[in-house]
Amino acid sequence: MNRFTRLGLFLAVLLVGGLIVAYEAGAFEGRKCAISGTITRDGKPLEWPKKDGLFLVIFVPENRGPGQDPILAESDRNTGTYRIHEIRSGRYMVAIHQFDERHMDALANRYDPYKTPLRVDVDEDGQVIDIDLPKELPR
């Protein structure tokens, strides 16, 4: 093996190693953003039959890879609002649950993380993503 072949091989190994380190450090992932929004149903605030209950809004990366866990938003059931302080830009499925005190979902689990039809693109820091659920739930 001549000197130029060894140099080329060394540079190739160095390049591949650098790419691996950059990938592991998250250099190829989207940028971090803060997002917020309001969830309504048929243009109206969500209705709660009783004072107790749990409101969950979860963003799930559409094409999940290693280390891309679902992100649970901070949510306020009284206002129907949610906020995520740090989420990577990209495409997400949005899961929404409106549990009562007996853990029954008023949305009939139609928007759970496995079958939610809701998809959103997180593009920029400070983005507001309002979601209006239909009166009639999807099948």
Image (tube, rainbow, N blue to C red):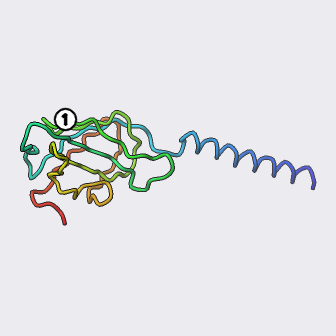
Task: Report the front residue among 132 and 99.
Answer: 99
What residue is shown with label 1? 76
Which residue is farthest right? 2
Q: Which residue is at a point 36% across and 50% down the rendered structure image? A: 60
Position above or below: 54 against 94: above
Which residue is farthest front? 102
Which residue is farthest top? 85
Which residue is farthest bottom? 139
Q: Which residue is at a point 44% across and 40% down the rendered structure image? A: 31
On the image, the x and y values in percent for residue 23 come to 58, 45
Q: Is residue 54 left or right of residue 114?
A: left
**Which amino acid does the dot numbered 1 rest on?**
Asp
Q: Quadrant of the N terminus?
A: bottom right
Dividing the picture into quadrants, the one containing residue 35 is: top left
On the image, the x and y values in percent for residue 3 come to 91, 49
Position above or below: 12 against 22: below
Position above or below: 76 against 129: above
Q: Which residue is at a point 41% across and 42% down the rendered structure image? A: 88
Task: Report the front residue among 113 and 34.
Answer: 113
On the image, the x and y values in percent for residue 103 come to 20, 47
Dividing the picture into quadrants, the one containing residue 57 is: top left
Q: Is residue 87 left or right of residue 27?
A: left
On the image, the x and y values in percent for residue 56 come to 24, 43
Q: Is residue 126 left or right of residue 61?
A: left
Q: Residues within 10 Å of mark 1 (few under 14, many from 20)?
A: some
In terms of secondary structure, where does tag 1 sit? Answer: strand
Q: Quadrant of the C terminus?
A: bottom left
